[in-house]
Amino acid sequence: MASNRAVIETAGLWKRYDDVEALRGLDLQVPSGSIFGFLGKNGAGKTTTMKVLLGMSRPTRGDAHVFGHSSAESNSSVEIRRRCAFVSDEKDLYDYMTVGEIVAFTRSFYPRWRGDLEQQYLHKFDLQLSRNIKGLSRGTRTKLAMLLALCRGAELLLLDEPTSGLDPAMAEDMLQALVTHVSREGSTVFFSSHQLSEVEQIADHVAIIDQGQAIVAGALDDLRSQYQRIHLVFENDAPEIKVRAPGTHRVRRQGRVVTILSSSRGDAVIEELRGYKPATFEVSPVTLKDIFLESVRTED
Amino acid sequence: MLWHKAWLETRWRFISALLILTVMAGGNVYDYLATERLLPRLNATTDTPVAEASGLADAIREAIEVQKDFRGFIWFQAFRQNLTQMGVFFAILLGCGGLLSESSKGSALFTLSLPVTRKQLLGARTGTGLAQLFAISMVPPLVIPILAPSIGQQFGIVDALAHGICIFFVAAMFFSLASFLSTLFGDIWRPLLIAIAIACFIAVAQFTVPQLGIYRVMSGESYFRTGALPWTGFLTSAVIATALLYSAAETLERRDF
């Protein structure tokens, strides 16, 4: 269950790589105990955010704190990593080790290593200790990387595309294992994914990042109830619509049709739009996919 | 466990280096049998004007003179040439790689997610590399006193150890150079090639700039000729190696992954 205390907090976080600005003032708060889905297009800044949080990259400016420790300082980032587990998008591990060797290697850094979970996941994921990592398929590497993350006794799991490379059945098993783990251990999960259905399935909080900024963030249930799509159809070409009421995110005009995404449940937007006298007027609930697509879609 | 990881990463380079250098040192011992028969009959044709003018004649005469006994032959063939040249190459090879080259393989993020500092990562790799370097500096010279009696010759163990120490100090400098270059380039090839180019440049330049004579330190020339260890050379090598490793640590600390 999520609490009000934030495990991750970023404020005005900027990260510039040469001439590319990966983050442009990212503000983010991840509540303790939440399963937080981090959504965005390729290159939106998801992986960079995770790297900055773990001290792998240093912010150009702004602050990033995990468990109240600044990730930009070398010693405090070690403390962050002691309490975190990270699974990268590539899931690349040491090719020159066997499964048993990398499990023993990782175990040596974590005094709270869960031997019982290690045995459980080795069996569940069908991982053989004697297998060379070099010979593992991408899916099996993903399972091994998840095992190494889940057994650390970590308070925070940072997972970059945790189910990439897995077939749908295995992805489902992995998500279930993750949810079970979180409910049993009480840890926080901050994960990125392109699979919106996955995020809807397990996340209780989401943030959508676009061009290095969080453009939507909050509890998933709140977002679903807060957002609505308003669909206007005109008899002739749609007029240019400018909504003054707050909470209007996106206005798209295509021929006779205008679609508006609104995050305001109040009547102000609806009343204002009725003033344009459309032939039909329809308000419908939205899914996370709708919110995501409307938020990150570039203007036509 | 970081030491174990560093060992697993470099073990084949280390084992190859140890085997090749040991076989070379052993081979030099048995080469003496053939050379011993040839040397008295060798009438060096060093009296050409070109050879005299270039100083080549003196060098050839000296080479022949030095190699007339077993100790001189071993110093000239093993310590001055084979173990020095190949020792530099293997020192550079052991120094290449590390965290930055891991990033090209994709495993750097896993390493960086561990609760250790980058200095600890570099320290474990450097410590492992220097221990391996010490072994490949000391074991091949020690093969010489072990094998020498089999051809009726003697070579002092203390002499072998002294030459091993000379190889180690200068090789550690090239190891540190490769380690430093490996924090600048993400692949293994550029650090390797640049470090080899620098080693070759020094080898050529030392003929005109004697202060660059680190290969004389590495071959233990002063120990061979006078019995004195090259302490100034050791100190210089140690200072340069420390400066390079410090630079490597600072560069790695600032780098984004």
Image (cartoon, grey):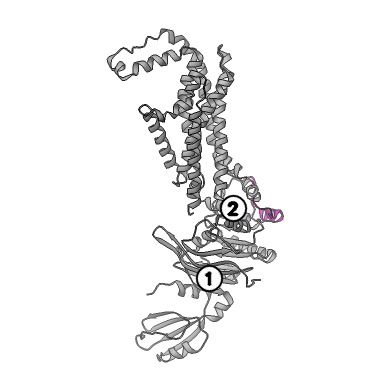
Judge if badges 2 and 1 mark residues of a common chain.
no
Question: Residue A163's x, y, as percent?
Answer: 56, 61
Residue A17: quarter of image: bottom left
Tell me if residue B93 can be seen: no
Q: In this picture, is A182 found above or below B138? A: below
In percent of the image, x 34 and y 18: which residue is there? B56
Residue sitting at the far front: B232
Q: Nearer the viewer, mark 2 or mark 1?
A: 2
The residue beneath circle 2 is B114
Residue A203 place in picture, x, y as percent: 59, 70
Give the spatial CA distance, label 2 vs label 1. Answer: 26 Å
Q: Quadrant of the C terminus of chain A?
A: bottom left
Inspect this view and state whether residue B29 appears: yes
Which segment did they paint magenta? A109-130
Asked where in the image residue B62 lies, by quadrant, the reply is top left
- At horizontal 45% and vertical 71% (from top left) the residue drawn is A296
Any magenta on residue A201?
A: no
Place of residue A146 in the rendered image (x, y in percent of width and height, measured from the top left):
61, 57
Residue B176, above or below A196:
above
Viewport quadrant of the N terminus of chain A: bottom right
Relative to B30, is B248 above or below? below
Query: Residue tagged by mark 1?
Result: A207
Three-letter code, disc 2: Leu
Q: Nearer the viewer, residue A78 or A42?
A: A78
Q: Secondary structure at mark 1?
A: strand
> Which chain hosts label 2?
B
- At label 2, counting other C-alpha atoms closer than 10 Å, the crowd grade (few under 14, some 14-19, many 20 or more) is many
